[in-house]
Image (cartoon, grey):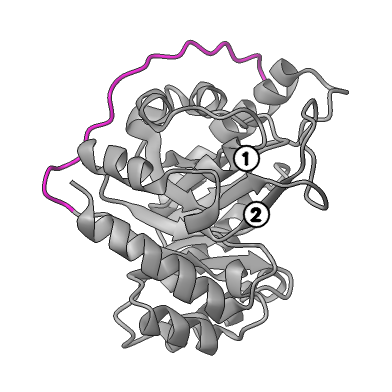
Amino acid sequence: MQDVKIKVHYEEISYTPGEEMKISLYSLSLSDRTPVQVVELAKKYGCDGIEWWCRENGHVDRANLEKSAKEISSIMDGSELEVAGLSPYFDFSENKDILARLFEAAQILGARNIRCHSYAFTGEIPVQELMRRQRGWLEAVVIPEAQRAGVRIMIEQHHNQICCTPNACRELVDGLPEENIGVIFDPGNSLFEGYTRPEYAISVIGKYLSHVHVKSARPVAEKGAVPSGRRYPMEFGAIASGDLDYEKIVAVLKAKGFDGFLSLEALDGRPGEQKMEQDILFLRKLVDSAE
């Protein structure tokens, strides 16, 4: 692939005034539940949609994509829940045939948005080289297939990866068509890499902001994961008791007119229904009261 030089052009986010944010559940949060149970709990706790976990033996089984997508589509039929997204795990070597099968499964589900990580960063290969490789793959392979399928790839802001900050996410996608590529803003992940204020993060991501993952963590005395270069462990848990002010984050998103999904990605050890009762109801209260 040819060398890619990236020049970032920032601008403010712009959405249609009056539209409301929606709440979804990332189904990996309920990895111990069947797809039927996931749908039942999402309805019980007032979700607007579900972001489906797609991996070998996931809720959407990547080893049996078409069959699994049809089963999930049938389960969701009549539920009045939207498909907030499909979350497969890419290794960034997928060719057009593999992408076509993934995008076909997304179409069966009615999923326009498809999550994508970025390269893991260990320090062995420079960030710039990994950024060049992933940008080249996006331009040459992914975007043409996404345009044909009418879907959008969403790069997740994720700790320990090259796109661990809002700036890095924007650098990777800038200049690509926002109809087919976006960014997942994840304030919880940012706690592991050095926090950025929501006003700044949302402004940097700009028109590429397509989705928000909701999780929180807090410093603890022991047990949790210690981010590189920091002293204290971090532990994921209930969003109401974490180190993030989600009332402020939701208010900033509302002020910018964001009308996409806030998707609960609670991967800590609480029982599944406890996560729903604590986090989805708390998030709904914030969305309904945001000014």
Badge 2 amino acid: Phe
Residue lying farthest to the front in this orientation: 221
Whether residue 275 is situated above or below residue 174 in the rendered picture: below
> Residue beneath label 2, please?
236
Magenta residue check for 144:
no
Whether residue 118 is situated above or below residue 241 in the rendered picture: above
Whether residue 235 is situated above or below residue 41 in the rendered picture: above
Q: Position of residue 20 (x, y in %)?
A: 20, 55
Q: Which residue lies at the image location 70% right of the left edge and 16% below the top edge?
A: 128
Judge by depth and name the residue closer to the eye, 232 or 92.
232
Label 2: few (<14), some or many (≥20) within 10 Å?
A: many
Judge by depth and name the residue closer to the eye, 15 or 274.
274
Q: Position of residue 223 (x, y in %)?
A: 82, 53
Q: Which residue lies at the image location 63% right of the left edge and 46% below the top edge?
A: 218
Whether residue 250 is situated above or below residue 135 in the rendered picture: below
Element under label 2? strand
User: Does the magenta stretch mainly form a helix, a strand or a loop?
Assistant: loop
Q: Position of residue 194 (x, y in %)?
A: 62, 27
> Residue beneath label 1, please?
158
Magenta residue check for 7:
yes
